[in-house]
Amino acid sequence: MSQRPERGFPEEEFAARCAAAQAAMAREGVDAMLFASEAEIRYFTGFLTPFWQSPTRPWFLVMPPAGKPVAVIPSIGAPLMRSCYVGEVVSWASPAAEDDGISLLHDVLRRHLSDASRLGLMMGRETALRMPLADFIGLRERLAEVALCDMTSAIQQIRMMKSHREIAKIRHVCGLACDVFDTVPDWVAAGMPLAELFRRFRIEALGTGVDDVSYLVGSAGPDGYDDIIAPPDDWPLQAGDVLMLDTGCVWDGYFCDFDRNFAIGRASQAALDAHHRLDDAIEAALMTARPGALARDLFTAMDRVLRPDGAHEDGGDDVGRYGHGLGIQLTEPPSHTGWDETELAAGMVLTLEPSIAYRAADGGARMMVAEENILLTGDGAELLTRRAPRDLPVIG
């Protein structure tokens, strides 16, 4: 079991994050930034709570050009937020019938914005406006002369570079999840319903020390499977099935994200071959992952193994990408696609996630996925997960 790091972060960590954002604001001529989503608010303040699962209330964070950010949030969250990295907490009783924090937010923004100012927002890929659209339109009307500036790329670049404390948390949760996967052969067997298997996996993971099993998907079928995101059902595992489990366990707000495959009772040659090709694709990506390479280079390295002729049939499938960034969200930029030109750098934490389509012994279409988590260092890729064996494990 990996050594447990300290929970939370010292104030200097958040000060550095905010300073990086404020430096980006200065470069872009942005006078204030507005965040309204859980990931950015937590990243800059440390505001960690499962209460985000409730969609009822809006939450706002205003980043000034210097100093600590200002939280404009429902009063139910004020005590916790005051313990976080903020200079001020402005709150109201929410939900409100008419004005759910918009006037307060406007007043805080106006401290930094004149009619000739620029307001930074997250507007691009992998962002969302977590507030009622009608409220945003109303706020925009009250700031009609203020120019909006898309700060997506700048903020995502900051978040892609993980500190040593962030890396320690991700390394720890990866180790805990690996420990759980190591137990799977001890309690999975033919006849076990998938729903029961999923429940047992969660119990084992929580017992190992993760805080939550926020994400758990999987599938099973003869010689392979045809879905990788469905919830479990009560159909029992059968001899000859290939079982896949993909988990995003969480420790202190940071995710792991990887999967493992197992054959139940016996493995067909088609399944064994598919697992080997996935392992070859992982190896190609590990050899490619270097500072200065591009995210698309990882895609290309894996795709050449999976689809040497460029065809979808009996090769790589069309899931869209072969991995992504990882951190306080299950998936973060960059995306290992053929179009993502993000330059890789030491300090990034990434997943390598090739997938392959193939024909099973019965002639039916099947797929298989593999996934590992890595840290990019100055020397290349360092595995944060204990790498899956090359040969498909046969259990049960």
Image (cartoon, grey):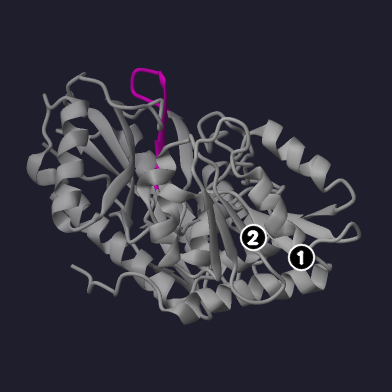
Question: Does residue 29 lie above or below 153 as drawn?
Answer: below
Residue 205, image x, y percentages: 19, 50
Please indicate, yes or no, whether residue 170 appears anywhere in the rendered image: yes
Q: Position of residue 330 (x, y in %)?
A: 44, 50
Q: Which residue is mark 1?
A: 112
Please, what secondary structure does the residue beneath circle 2 have? strand
Residue 298 in picture, x, y percent from top left: 58, 57
Depth check: give the residue in front, 5 or 380.
5
Q: Secondary structure at mark 1?
A: loop
Q: Is residue 363 magenta?
A: yes
- Left or right, residue 93 beside residue 204: right
| Disc assigned to residue 62 | 2
Residue 313 magenta: no
Q: Is residue 386 left or right of residue 161?
A: left
Instruction: Please tell me which of labels 1 and 2 falls first in the chain.
Output: 2
Q: Residue 361: x percent and y percent?
A: 33, 23
Rendered-image quadrant of the N terminus: bottom left
**3D distance between C-alphas at marks 1 and 2:** 10 Å
Q: Amino acid at mark 1?
A: His
Q: Is residue 95 left or right of residue 114?
A: left
Is 67 located above or below residue 327 in the figure?
below
Point 66% across, 70% down: residue: 21
Q: Residue at x 20, y 42 (%)?
A: 202
Q: Start and end of the magenta stretch?
A: 359-370
